[in-house]
Amino acid sequence: MSRAFIVSGAMIPMGKHRTSSYSGLAVPPVSKAIRDAGLKPSEIGAVYCGHAFGGMLTGQRIVKEVGIGGVPVFNVDNACSGGASAVHLAWKSVCSGEHAAALVIGVDKLTQFGGGTLPLVEEDIEVRNGMVMPALYAMRARRYLFERGESVELLAQVSTKARRHGAMNPFAQLRKPVSVEEVVASRMIADPLTLMQCCPTGDGAAAVVVVNDDMRKRLALPTVEIRGSVLHSGTPTSGFRDMLRPEITRDSAGDAFEQAGMGPEDIDVVELHDAFSIAELVYYEALGLCAEGESATFLTSGQSTFGGKVVVNPSGGLLSKGHPVGCSGVAQVVELYWQLTGQAGKRQVPNARTGMTHVTGGGIAQLDHGACAIHILNALDNI
Amino acid sequence: MNFSRCPSGEDAASEGLPISDLDTARMPDFTVHDGATFLICAQTAEGHRSFPLTDGGQRVEVGPEGVLYSFSTVYVSSSQAVPYTIGYVDFPGDVRVLAKVRGALHALRCDCVVRLASEGSEWFVEPVARASQ
């Protein structure tokens, strides 16, 4: 198996872009990513488009606008992991030698639903019984506070960190710093999670170009290598599940580290799936960034922000940057491409060499999550 | 070719027909005995239980009491009138079920005992008032 590299990435600012179609959202970053890579559209061998709510032929509707046609276009739905699943498939296609250059798109438009919680699949028995995504994470939060003896103010500190980071990111949807008091006092969504502990409704699009070794040598651009790419589905159980130890993330991270020949201690920067405040705390432990039971201290001691052990979500994460579902996995990869090639501006993590992206997807009965995708990216010294 | 049974292409056998898992009238979620509500679950040959009962599983009943693992009152929902409270309940036999929670919500806490109840076609759980809780 050969190697795969990212040579360009682009995204639009996340936000409420009600007057834009799916192609209206995605064409600008797609065009920029291809242009920045120094490629012609005809050199793209395949397109992988992650989305959850775009409808039929979303990828084709986008790439026809930039002159790409005739090549395979794959539309990938894996809920919040759709974009990262598309990256995974592109990585596979390049590593296998099938394509020299693949385009990955992540896009979704949540304003089409007019606000509120994401529409889940009504066929699912838990959804029929009232499950919505904030409630799933709220139950996780309730259990965390119960077992760990912590308070809601701890959860709020995740949001204040996200907003502090997001304030430095011109692509973030929510850029106003907030206090713990404001987070706790904001409108209740699913007890104990308040509005500012939930990712905002928004629209977004991002794109990256993945190439093989010959192509990256020819292009001679700032480059990161995809050292690990792992996609897991959830393991069903009809019985007890420890909501503070999400096995899909733990197992995926373990496989990704093994594939990359690295460990958590090698990671400088992480973009993880903080769709709700509690998620970040749980995933610190599941990804191995801190020991089990130490997530609260890891956060409050500043180990997950600038100047700490590893900077988690320098973009502001899903809580601040925004979470247009199928877009997020690709937007995370773009953020790390910028971080690892020194292009992240005010939010640049100093000397970042290695990073990890992590998304999970979906709320359906009997699974921790439906999908989890993790990528480990490494800056390339010799272009 | 010598087929030991009817070739697959010739017989739309019953095992190949769709499962009517949305037909709640055919497979009710709960039953009531002497005023106590029980959930109707499926049990595999290996003894694993799951809710709800599906085609192919052996029918078993669980309840009426379980332990509330966690819960939340929902104030924003795309599918149901708010507010409402739901929680994961662990029943004996290692069956976890997402349940609507009613009754004295102020008494709820993780690991408290709850009891199944029903009203018309709906089932839910309520906290059990015990001195030890």
Image: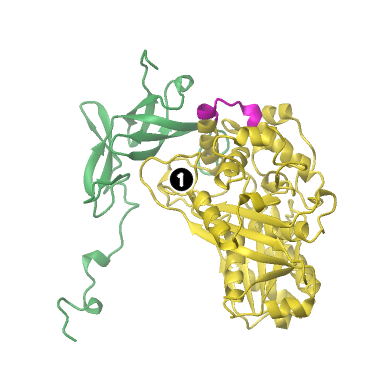
Chain colours: A yellow, B green
Residue at image point 81% right, 58% down: A342
Pinpoint residue B79: horizontal percent, then vertical percent: 51, 43
Quadrant location, the C terminus of chain B: top left
- Region of the chain picked out in magenta, as a range: A145-155
Residue at image point 67% right, 52% down: A267
Which amino acid lies under the numbered mark 1 shown in the image of this protein?
Val
Q: Is disc 1 surrounded by few (<14), some (14 to 19) or many (20+) residues within 10 Å?
A: many
Q: Which residue is mark 1?
A: A127
Pinpoint residue B8: horizontal percent, then vertical percent: 24, 76
In the displayed structure, does residue A180 sit left or right of residue A273?
Answer: right
Pinpoint residue A29: horizontal percent, then vertical percent: 76, 65
In the displayed structure, does residue A167 sit left or right of residue A68?
Answer: right
Q: Nearer the viewer, residue A16 or A309?
A: A309
Residue at image point 26% right, 49% down: B26
Quadrant position of residue A22 = bottom right
Residue at image point 37% right, 12% down: B131
Looking at the image, residue A146 lies above or below residue A78: above
Quadrant position of residue A44 = bottom right
Q: Per the image, is A129 magenta?
A: no
Per the image, label 1 sits on a secondary structure element best described as helix
Quadrant location, the N terminus of chain B: bottom left
